[in-house]
């Protein structure tokens, strides 16, 4: 549920320290509730999270949100858009105060071409996301909402993070009203 990648962050910190031009990678800070990316808009940076938690979500045509994932330390965002030269596929919002390493798109592409370690790490990140997304989709198809909610609450407790009801519902792909009904079952 909360994805992290310490080795990717470690590599990013090394690249930050070694950069020739100080504008290739900059440190940016976002406050809770602030968007790092907005769905459908062009992004100017690729970011690796240094501190904090963000939610990655789609807003559908009916204005309903669907949370794809919660991301934290070491996770990269904006890489697909940079590689494919497309607008942001989803919105990324800070759930806590967040600090990121923001790569210029030009420098990010240069790294892909000349740094095999970076490229292999990025391939691994993308492969992990495909596996995780597939297993989450099958999990939601195979298990009841009650079971999925129970699992979400367990993970929330283990990670010691507070998730608003609206975000829980968006993560589970249900309405807040349906979530409240399920939560009442837990209280019985």
Image (spheres, helix red, strand yellow):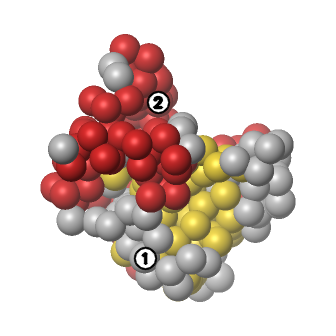
In the picture, the quarter occupied by the C terminus is top left
Q: Position of residue 147 (x, y in %)?
A: 27, 30
Q: Residues within 10 Å of mark 1 (few under 14, many from 20)?
A: some
Q: Does residue 85 lie above or below 161 as drawn? A: above
Q: Does residue 148 lie above or below 166 as drawn? A: above
Residue in the picture at 44% in, 58% down? 165
Give the quadrant of residue 97: bottom left
Q: Position of residue 54 (x, y in %)?
A: 48, 64
Res. 16 visible in picture: no
Q: Secondary structure at mark 1?
A: loop
Q: Secondary structure at mark 2?
A: helix
Q: Nearer the viewer, residue 186 or 129?
A: 186
Give the quadrant of residue 107: bottom right
Residue in the picture at 36% in, 40% down? 182
Give the quadrant of residue 36: bottom right
Q: Nearer the viewer, residue 25 or 34?
A: 34
Residue furthest top in the image: 142
Q: Position of residue 184 (x, y in %)?
A: 31, 47
Residue identifier under label 1: 96
Number of disc labels: 2
Residue in the picture at 31% in, 32% down? 146
Q: Nearer the viewer, residue 34 or 29?
A: 34
Residue in the picture at 37% in, 74% down? 51
Q: Does residue 83 lie above or below 30 as drawn? A: above
Q: Does residue 157 lie above or below 96 as drawn? A: above
**In-image side of 127 versus 46 (left or right):** left
**In-image side of 98 versus 65 (left or right):** left
**In-image side of 17 versus 24 (left or right):** left
Q: Position of residue 25 (x, y in %)?
A: 57, 75
- Of labels 1 and 2, earlier in sequence is 1
Residue identifier under label 2: 133
Disc 1 to disc 2, C-alpha distance: 24 Å
């Amino acid at each position: 549920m909360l994805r992290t990648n310490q080795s990717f962050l470690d590599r990013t910190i090394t690249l930050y320290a070694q950069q020739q031009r100080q504008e290739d990678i900059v440190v940016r800070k976002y406050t809770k509730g602030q968007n790092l990316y907005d769905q459908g808009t062009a992004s100017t940076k690729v970011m690796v999270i240094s501190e904090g938690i963000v939610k990655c979500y789609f807003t559908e045509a009916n204005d309903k949100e669907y949370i794809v994932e919660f991301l934290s330390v070491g996770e990269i965002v904006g890489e697909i858009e940079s590689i494919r030269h497309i607008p942001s596929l989803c919105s990324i919002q800070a759930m806590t105060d967040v600090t990121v390493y923001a790569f210029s798109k030009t420098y990010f592409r240069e790294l892909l071409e000349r740094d095999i370690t970076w490229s292999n790490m990025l391939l691994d990140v993308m492969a992990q996301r495909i596996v995780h997304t597939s297993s989450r989709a099958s999990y939601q198809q195979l298990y009841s909402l009650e079971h999925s909610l129970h699992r979400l609450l367990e993970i929330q407790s283990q990670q010691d993070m507070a998730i608003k009801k609206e975000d829980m519902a968006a993560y589970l792909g249900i309405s807040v009203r349906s979530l409240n009904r399920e939560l009442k079952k837990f209280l019985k």
